[in-house]
Structure formats: structure tokens, C-alpha cells
């Protein structure tokens, strides 16, 4: 079965389509659709067309057009690109222009990708709905009254709405997989350390990881092949060979053992989501996979552990945004302390303030051992649960989200309900393992439902191949929202 990104990529490689024509088409689609969706914070049309023309010229002269051959890519606005914004969706960085390229931007440019624009996000990647951005609320292309998920909601919505074929986001607790599921596309969080975080504005440094969005598994494999690998500028980057993901993605896995965690099918899971995920299990069974029940007993602690660890690291990382070193400086102040307080009060939104205060409290004298240190100890136990499960299975299959896309504004007054949207994705970040979301069905109202595959450390090749096995015998990935249909 042909797939979406693969068709575009092959057309570029063969010369049937030029990068200039494809980029112009994407710009036209953005002009027609983004007024409703609001996926982008910045579009650099002239520069994108210039990049495309240069790639076409290389191809015409017989030179290599690179791995991407001129495919357009959007980047979440917390990933630095030289000369472009890096607002993180925050007023405090509203006027910040990056003076350098992130590792992933360097790799994409070197491999012939066209960097088309900057996509919207929850402020500093803190959120699950893309409602926390200081600049716009991004809407789900399947239903403009609903959220696309977060924090990488702009990147997911742009691909889902057909405005570009590929994008990058960051995933700290589900911020790639959850919006991919709610928008009906493929999204992948690599193993922690597989992709360099150099040039990613930090939220929670021990959890953050950059990864791809695409309309199909091949597109995710293509981006991963380019951006994965060692980078000496990131001390957490792992020096391991990068497999040829696109060369192996179509090879089915023989003797596949898939674990199903009983803790992922409990009260709170929407019946339509459970039905779609269980139907996907039967598809895998029909493909020869063995389905084995496993247990992740400490997963019930993941929400509490995640918000303690992530908020503590956010408190530390965001202390640099004080109106002196970086970012917005208030004009309403007297002394230095008042300037710090006023600048941060004016520059940060409510959700960011909430997490900074929670993290600062957890790190304060007298509370560090009781909260942050204890959370790290439980985090280790969560990882041990996965280690034990992967002794008997190759992958773990689960829902991505407890429900399909919720209405904009529905959960904003209840932070805990919003946090629980990530209940099935948080544990992968805490354990540092890779995870992938792939479409597996639709709710009765026609909203996408995602299937999550989780693997051991550095098993991206296995995840992509397993996802492609499912994709090759289903057509969920080929469906698009009405707004994306020409």
C-alpha cells in the first residue's frame, strides 16, 4: 500500500516534482487553511523558496539533492534555527531571534530539507492542548472546536491539515505522541539520548527529546535517519550507530512478542479508544504476533512523579529568563529585585508560573528529600518495571490518550484533568524509552484515535517496523480531515 510521505519523497527523488513547486504548494495550503487552524507562528516564504530553488539547482546540475531532496519541514518554536524566532510560545521570548542552529536544524539543512516555518506550542512546552501559547490557540483540523493536543500541537496540526508533509516537535511527557494521536498522524519520541538536544530550549532536561511528525511511518523513519546520532555538544547524546530506518521499515518482524499492560486498560479509558486499541491487537495477532499480558505496577505513580521531576527541572531551567540575561524586561520596577519579579510576572503565563512554583517548592530546603529525591527514586522503579517487561516481550502496546480530542476550553479550569491526558505517555519519558503513536481508528463522532507502541532503549528500528506492519494492512493513516482535502 503506497503511503503519503513516501509518494512525495519518491516524486522529488525522480524529478517528477520540484522542491520549488512543492514548497509553493505548501505555502498556498498554509495561506488557505492556517487562518482557521493557527498551527504556525512564523512563515519565512522567501527563504523557503530560496532553499527550494537551491536544491532544485543542485539536482539539475547532477549534484546530490540530499536525503530529503527538498521536502518541507516545520519546526516547533522551541527548536533553534539561525535567524528565526525561538519564542517557546511565551511573551518572555517574544522578540528573541536565535543566533545559531540547533543540531537537528543543521542536520535537516545538510540533508536537503526546506525549513518552512515555526509552529505553535504550549508555552515552554508545558501543556497538553496548545491552549497555553501566548500568541494563538491552535485548533484540531478534524474539528476546529477541539484541541490538537500539546505541547507540540502546532507541529501535529500542520501535518494533519496537509500544510506540510513533515515536522519536528519535542516530547517531555507525551508532547509528540499525544497530539499525533489526536490529529490522526504518526509521531515518535526517540530514546533519550538518541537525538541531540543542542539548540532545544530546555523545559525538563532529563526528559526532553526531539522527534518527528509525519503522515506515515516512512516519513518518521526518514526524519529519524537524518537527525539521530551523536553530537558532542550534548553531554547526554549517545554515541551509537544510526540504523538505516528507511531501508528496514518495510521488513516485517518475525516472531514478534507484544506486551499488553493490564494497568493501561482500567477505569477512565474511553470505550471507543479501548475498542480501537483492542482491534489493533487483533490485527497484530493476525500478522503472527504473540500477545502477552504484562504488568507495569508502578505506572500508577507516573503522573505524580512526572510533575515533581519536570516542575523541579523547569524551575531551574527557566531561572535564566529574568529580564537581564534573556527575554522580556519590565519597565515597571524600582530596584533590581522588583525588576526580576515584574519581568517574570509579565512574561510567563499561568501554567508556566504554576510549574515553576511547584518545582521551586519541591527543591527548597527541608522539602528536597521528601519530594524531588523521592520522585527520582520512584522514577527508577518505573524504569525497572519496563526492564522486567521487556525480558519477555519485544514491544508494549497501549492507548496513547484516555479519550479522543477534547473541546477547547473544556479542561483549562481543571489542571489535574489536563495532566491526566498524558497518563499513558509519561512513563516512557521517565524511563527514557522510545515510543510511537500511529492512527488506529476513529471515535463515533469521527475523531482520530492513536495506538502507542513502546520499546526498549534504542529500539527505534523495531518500533518503526512494527508500526509499518500495522500500517501496511490498515488504512487509518490515509484518511485526512475535510480541511485537508483539495
Image (tube, helix red, strand yellow):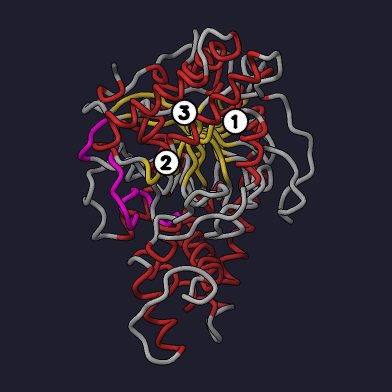
Q: Main secondary structure of the magenta part?
A: loop
Residue extent of the magenta highlight: 125-145
Element type at mark 2? helix
Judging by the rendered image, the residue that carries numbered circle 1 is: 223
The one nearer the camera, 2 or 335, is 335
Residue 237, given in percent of the width and then of the height, sits at 72, 49
The one nearer the camera, 406 or 204, is 204
- In the image, residue 143 lies in the stretch drawn in magenta: yes
Quarter of the picture holding the C terminus: top left
First in residue order: circle 2 vs circle 3: 2
Judging by the rendered image, the residue that carries numbered circle 3 is: 438
Residue 421, given in percent of the width and then of the height, sits at 37, 48
Residue 185 vertical placement versus 431 (above, below): above
How crowded pointer 1 is (Cα within 10 Å; few <14, some 14-19, many 20+) is rated as: many
Locate residue 160: give its quadrant.
top left
Locate residue 180: give its quadrant.
top left
Q: Is residue 346 left or right of residue 83?
A: left
Examine the rendering and report whether any part of residue 224 can be seen. yes
Rounded to the nearest angstrom, the CA distance separating label 2 from label 3 is 10 Å
Element type at mark 3? strand
The residue shown at (43%, 28%) is 164
The one nearer the camera, 480 or 400, is 480
Q: Is residue 73 left or right of residue 153?
A: right
The one nearer the camera, 363 or 109, is 109
Residue 340 vertical placement versus 63 (above, below): below
The residue shown at (46%, 75%) is 323
Judging by the rendered image, the residue that carries numbered circle 2 is: 178
First in residue order: circle 1 vs circle 3: 1
Amino acid at each position: 500500500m503506497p503511503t503519503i510521505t513516501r509518494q512525495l519523497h519518491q516524486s522529488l527523488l525522480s524529478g517528477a516534482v520540484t522542491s520549488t513547486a512543492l514548497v509553493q504548494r505548501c505555502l498556498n495550503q498554509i495561506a488557505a487553511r492556517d487562518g482557521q487552524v493557527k498551527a504556525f507562528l512564523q512563515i519565512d516564504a522567501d527563504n523557503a523558496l530560496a532553499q527550494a530553488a537551491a536544491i532544485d539547482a543542485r539536482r539539475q546540475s547532477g549534484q546530490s539533492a540530499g536525503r530529503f531532496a527538498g521536502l518541507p519541514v516545520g519546526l516547533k518554536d522551541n527548536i533553534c534555527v539561525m535567524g528565526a524566532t525561538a519564542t517557546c510560545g511565551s511573551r518572555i521570548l517574544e522578540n528573541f531571534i536565535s543566533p545559531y542552529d540547533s543540531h537537528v536544524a543543521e542536520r535537516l539543512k545538510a540533508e536537503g530539507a526546506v525549513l518552512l516555518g515555526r509552529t505553535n506550542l504550549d508555552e515552554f512546552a508545558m501543556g497538553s492542548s496548545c491552549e497555553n501559547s501566548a500568541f494563538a490557540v491552535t485548533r484540531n483540523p478534524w474539528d476546529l472546536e477541539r484541541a490538537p493536543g500539546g505541547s507540540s500541537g502546532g507541529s501535529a496540526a500542520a501535518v494533519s491539515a496537509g500544510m506540510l508533509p513533515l515536522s519536528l516537535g519535542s516530547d517531555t511527557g507525551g508532547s509528540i505522541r499525544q497530539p499525533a494521536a489526536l490529529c490522526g498522524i504518526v509521531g515518535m519520541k526517540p530514546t533519550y539520548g538518541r537525538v541531540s538536544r543542542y539548540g532545544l530550549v530546555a523545559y525538563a532536561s532529563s526528559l526532553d527529546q526531539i522527534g518527528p511528525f509525519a503522515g506515515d511511518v516512512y516519513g518518521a523513519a526518514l526524519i529519524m535517519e537524518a537527525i539521530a546520532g551523536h553530537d558532542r555538544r550534548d553531554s547526554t547524546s549517545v554515541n551509537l550507530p544510526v540504523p538505516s530506518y528507511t531501508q528496514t521499515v518495510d521488513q516485517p518482524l518475525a516472531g514478534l512478542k507484544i506486551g499488553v499492560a493490564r494497568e493501561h486498560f482500567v477505569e477512565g479509558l474511553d470505550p471507543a479508544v479501548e475498542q480501537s486499541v483492542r482491534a489493533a491487537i487483533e490485527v497484530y495477532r493476525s500478522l503472527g504476533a504473540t500477545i502477552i499480558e504484562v504488568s507495569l505496577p508502578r505506572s500508577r505513580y507516573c503522573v505524580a512523579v512526572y510533575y515533581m521531576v519536570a516542575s523541579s527541572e523547569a524551575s531551574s531551567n527557566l531561572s535564566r529568563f529574568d529580564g537581564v540575561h534573556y527575554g522580556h524586561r519590565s519597565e515597571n520596577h524600582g530596584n533590581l529585585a522588583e525588576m526580576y519579579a515584574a519581568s517574570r510576572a509579565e512574561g510567563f503565563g499561568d501554567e508556566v508560573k504554576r510549574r515553576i512554583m511547584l518545582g521551586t517548592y519541591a527543591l527548597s530546603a527541608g522539602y528536597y528529600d521528601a519530594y524531588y529525591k523521592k520522585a527520582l527514586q520512584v522514577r527508577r522503579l518505573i524504569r525497572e518495571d519496563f526492564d522486567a517487561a521487556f525480558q519477555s516481550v519485544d514491544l508494549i502496546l497501549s492507548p496513547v490518550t484516555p479519550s479522543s480530542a477534547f473541546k477547547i476550553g473544556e479542561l483549562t479550569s481543571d489542571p489535574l484533568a489536563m495532566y491526566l491526558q498524558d497518563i499513558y505517555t509519561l512513563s516512557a519519558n521517565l524511563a527514557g524509552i522510545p515510543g510511537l503513536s500511529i492512527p488506529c481508528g476513529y471515535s463515533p463522532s469521527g475523531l482520530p484515535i492513536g495506538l502507542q507502541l513502546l520499546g526498549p532503549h534504542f529500539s527505534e528500528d523495531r518500533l518503526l517496523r512494527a508500526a509499518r506492519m500495522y500500517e501496511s494492512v490498515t488504512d487509518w493513516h490515509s484518511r485526512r480531515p475535510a480541511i485537508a482535502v483539495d
